[in-house]
Image: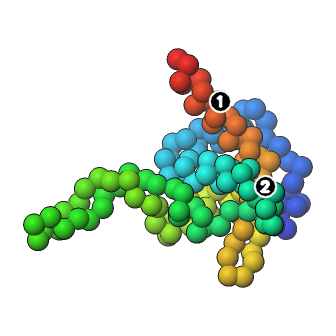
Amino acid sequence: MDEKMHQRFKGVRFSEDQTSMFADIVETDTALKRIFMTIVKLSVDNKDDATGGAVTIKQLLEHVKLTRKVQTNDEGQKKYKLMDAPIDRKQAERKMDVLFKMSLCYYVSVAPAKLIYPTERGTAVCSELLKRVKSNKIN
């Protein structure tokens, strides 16, 4: 969702059922969930800086780690081991497209990058995900 569309639908909120449904969708994909939660967290943490809480793809690449197969060179043979590694740029961009289409985030194009912000709907879905995490820790 670009900035123009965001401004047009800024006041639209999800119902509780819709928020729960979108939280279920985000929760099923680990990479999507980590990217989404990182965007909201960095946006809140950086609210007072010059960009007003914007997040870039570069920041996501620095903060989001996934457990995936990484090539190692053991004894002259190439092997793959499961390790925590930074997310690939291409994968991060694909997941961002999903978040834009779900209207959980929007972007402002500033050459040479996109500044990414969570929408109010996105922060509602994020708080639903955080509630679920807290309730799982209690149970």
In the rendered structure, find residue 111 and report the number of the disc placed on it.
none
Instruction: Give the residue displayed 52% in from the left and 56% down from the top.
Output: 64
Report the amino acid beneath label 1.
Lys
Instruction: Give the residue displayed 72% in from the left and 32% down from the top.
Output: 17
Horizontal and vertical percent position of residue 46: 74, 56
Q: What element carries label 2?
A: loop
Question: In the picture provided, is 79 more to the left or to the right than 127?
Answer: left
**Visual colour scheme:** rainbow
Q: Which of 132 and 101 is in front in this view?
A: 132
Question: In the picture provided, is 7 more to the left or to the right than 29?
Answer: right
Task: State the separation of the CA atoms marked 1 and 2.
Answer: 22 Å
Q: Name the residue under label 1.
A: 131
Q: Residue reaching furthest top?
A: 139
Count neighbours of disc 2 (C-alpha within 10 A) and say few if under 14, some if 14 to 19, many if 20 or more: few
Horizontal and vertical percent position of residue 83: 33, 53
Q: Which of 50 and 97 is in front in this view?
A: 50
Q: Residue reaching furthest front?
A: 49
Q: Is mark 1 on a helix, strand or loop?
A: helix
Instruction: Give the mark nearest the N terminus, 1 or 2.
Output: 2
Q: Is residue 137 above or below residue 49?
A: above
Horizontal and vertical percent position of residue 101: 68, 59
Instruction: Give the residue displayed 55% in from the left and 41% down from the top.
Output: 27
Q: Mark 2 points at which residue?
A: 47
Instruction: Give the residue displayed 68% in from the left and 34% down from the top.
Output: 128
